[in-house]
Amino acid sequence: MSKPRLIIDTDPGHDDAIALILAHHFADVVGITTVAGNTTVENATKNAIRICDLLDVSTPVHSGASAPLVAAPDFASEVHGDDGLGGIQLPEPSRAEASDRAIEFLLDAVEPDLWVVAIGPLTNIAQVLNRDKSWFERVAGLSLMGGTTGGGNVTAAAEFNIYFDPEAADVVFRAGGKTLMSGLNLTHQVQISATELEHVVKSSPESLRTRFIDQNFARIIERLHDLTGSPEVAMHDPCAVLAVTHPDLFEFSPREVKVELTGSHTRGMTVVDERLRVVRDLSKIEVGYGVDAHAVKSLIFEVLYGDVSEPE
Ligand code: RIB
Ligand code: CA
């Protein structure tokens, strides 16, 4: 069976980096577009190219939006560091970005069998939809990491990718195209701890790649432990990739989703309608509720560290 074809829209970002590694392993990544979020779009673009260098792939990287549609950018430096991949030593990018026209690339490169996986704020996707309302009819679908059916991570109500640019998320969810939403309620079911990593890190020969992966997990687990007290890291962005490449490991349900824009405590909240009703036309937006976390983590460990499985 041929590999799924993907465009990844991303703001690398430690978990974005793992998602990019998984995407290149399980899919045909025809392009990467970058967006401001965890860090500036300049840093995100450099990081995306550095990760491609690590994987020895020539995936074109097109830079996109440097700021949200309306709000001022509020980068996640306290988690990902000032350059977006804090704590990780990587060589400088081997090449320049393919273009600074991510929107045009997303408009022109999409095809009916191609999925777009958005693992950062939705600014680029919103700008695409503002230019071409029919865009969703020209892609297989949009798999996004963002939102939640429960509590947030940036505020009590809002998840980071939505909170960074709620106006963009509002455009995307109002468009109502084929969308898989991997929110925190789903991604928090797939947590990796330092203890687990000690078990799975095989004595594989030291390489730039294994050093990168070890530094990535060490840094993000340390920061999250400092910030939340939790000694583990959720595989947020990897879920949005694996929801396309391994759909059988996930459970999604159609839901109407609205984005709160004006609430003084709830701006950026994804309001997921879970009322039991008989509706005629089911929403094309599907919200993730279930995941085989053991199988997903085994896949992640296998790709990152070779054929190991998660400790029982
Ligand atoms: O809330 C998780 C999301 O915000 C992920 O995309 C992660 O990269 C952070 O930016
Ligand atoms: Ca991200």
Image: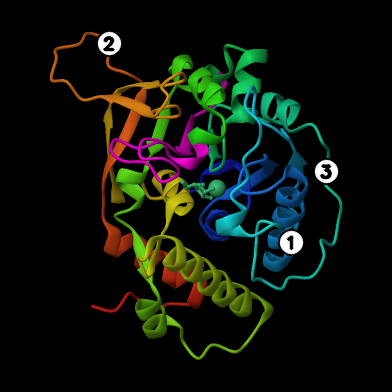
Where is residue 302? Give x, y as percent.
44, 72
Determine if the magenta segment contains residue 224.
Answer: no
Where does label 2 land, which residue? 281
Query: For the residues marked 2 and 3, what is the alpha-carbon distance in whole angstroms?
Result: 41 Å
Determine if the magenta segment contains residue 146.
Answer: yes
Q: Secondary structure at mark 3?
A: loop
Mark 1 is on which residue type?
A: Arg
Residues at discs 2 and 1 in contact (Cβ within 8 Å): no
Label drawn at residue 50: 1
Residues at discs 2 and 3 in contact (Cβ within 8 Å): no
Mark 1 CB near ligand 2 (8 Å cut): no
Where is residue 305? Give x, y as percent.
49, 77
Where is residue 116? Give x, y as percent.
55, 36
Mark 3 is on which residue type?
A: Ala
Q: Is residue 293 above or below residue 254?
A: below
Q: Main secondary structure of the magenta part?
A: loop
Query: For the residues marked 2 and 1, what is the alpha-carbon distance in whole angstroms?
Result: 44 Å
Q: Residues within 10 Å of mark 1 (few under 14, many from 20)?
A: some
Q: Residue at x 29, y 55 (%)?
A: 189
